[in-house]
Amino acid sequence: MTVVTRFAPSPTGYLHIGGARTALYNWLFAKHHAEYGSGGRFLLRIEDTDRKRSTEDAVAAILDGLKWLGLDWDGDAVSQFTMAGRHAEIARQLLDEGNAYKCYCSPEELQEMRDSARAEGRKTMYDGRWRDRDPADAPPGVDPVIRLRAPHNGETVIPDMVQGEVKVNNGELDDMILLRADGSPTYMLAVVVDDHDMGVSHVIRGDDHLTNAFRQIQIYHGLGWEVPQFAHIPLIHGADGAKMSKRHGALGVDAYRDQGFLPEAVCNYLLRLGWSHGDDEIIRRDQAIEWFALESVGKSPAKFDVDKLTSLNGHYIREAEDARLVDLVMPLLARSLDGGLAEDTESRLAKGMAGLKERAKTLLELAESAEIYAMTRPLSLNEKAAEMVEGDGRAHLTSLRGRLADVATWSHEALETAVRTYAETAELKLGKAAQPLRAALTGRTVSPSIFEVIEILGRAEVLGRIDDVLKDG
């Protein structure tokens, strides 16, 4: 059997981090069966039936977020709204077959029902007053809704692939509305029809949908359709165990991209939020596809920890190809330096990226440290760097300027020898000589190896930056 999963977001905002994890799990399950089973497909459905809240911008943000994460879907993205006619057709089919009925209750009657139930301490459920009533009793001028004739006896059971067997007494579920009085389908009906028509075999989603599943199964049974397998994954909580919110990092995927996270780091982190493979923490995409199984999804809520994500991102930055990081950092530098990049910035970054990426945990940090290769002369020194080139620092810079100018072969080894020789001659620790040099050449007191920086900047730039500082004095 070909496994078919789907991700079905509502386009009422960005692709949030919980939705991204749901999409990832669906994608991995389908990909695993495509490569190691009898076939797998991952489908995308935009549940845009709420026309007041659904926006094209939100649709674009969802598609963009999925593409950034590398979660490609099979076929075209489907709009649920465009299938409203099909949903209504199925509601009428249920009506014709006696598995649904018309309800003529007014809003006032429904409110009275709810008020009475609350007053008596009962669940606020529809009392089924039109379930077996003669439609001839219908009040004039009232457009009815169509309700499912749900079973009131027995149980509805879900053999959930994550939660295990879960069940509910049918007496706790009322006859839900399938088609509103204006002819528009409800979410419950639309989801069932769409999943059936799209051939979805596995519904993998958050466990906040578990109660919906009981109702949706009753629709499947009413239609005589095969019920897909369900897997309801626990939601993500904050590090403090509370429900996930913006203060925990419940942001859109686009926000993490803007903060300098790599998509592979985000995916790796989301994968481990509720799923495990032994003690493995760093999991490549190909490994994730091979290893992923719903049986390894935990039943408890996962805790989101921004610090752990950031640390993991640092690993992926160190593992990333230098050329890719250069491409990612260049626009960030152009923005932070207002477009005023040195002419040789890109080639300098290509040479210096191996040293720069060792310390960075985000692309923003990487871009900030890369500014030393992108700034135009004269450099603006920060407060600590400015202090470093005063007094004895200025004297050391003057002497070092001459030593560097005399270096015949502009190589890391020759440059380090020149600076070390000066330090020994002046009876200084190497740091006492190197720190003023670092301050003058980078505008700050922290950088990759200063000899690597000197080699990459080149003779003319190094001597020019030193002259700028000495001139200012």
Image (tube, rainbow, N blue to C red):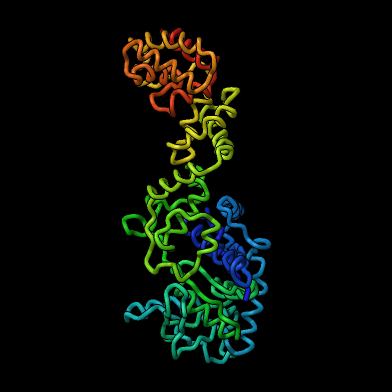
User: Which residue is painted at 46% across and 84% down in the image?
Assistant: 156
Q: Position of residue 379 (x, y in %)?
A: 48, 18
Taking depth in this image into account, of 54 and 261 the one nearest to the observer is: 261
Q: Quadrant of residue 123?
A: bottom left
Numbered label tally: 0
Residue 420, given in percent of the width and then of the height, sits at 39, 17
Residue in view at x 42 percent, y 66 percent: 234
Please state if 224 lies on the left or on the right of 297 as rendered: right
Out of 33 and 471, give the one closest to the viewer.
33
| Position in image of residue 278 (x %, y %) | 41, 62
Q: In the rendered image, is residue 180 in sight?
A: no
Instruction: Work out which quarter of the rendered image holds the C terminus and state it.
Output: top left
Whether residue 205 appears in this view of the structure is yes
Is 75 drawn above or below residue 229 in the view shown? above
Q: Name the residue: 37% across, 20% down.
A: 435
Q: Please determine whether, in this image, residue 29 is positioned above or below residue 143.
A: above
The quadrant of the image that shows the N terminus is bottom right
For the residue pair 440 and 182, the one nearer the viewer reads as 440
- Side (left or right) of 307 relative to 191: left
Would you say 471 lies left or right of 190 here?
left
**Residue 351: quadrant of the picture:** top right
| Residue 58 rendering spot, x and y as whole percentages | 57, 53
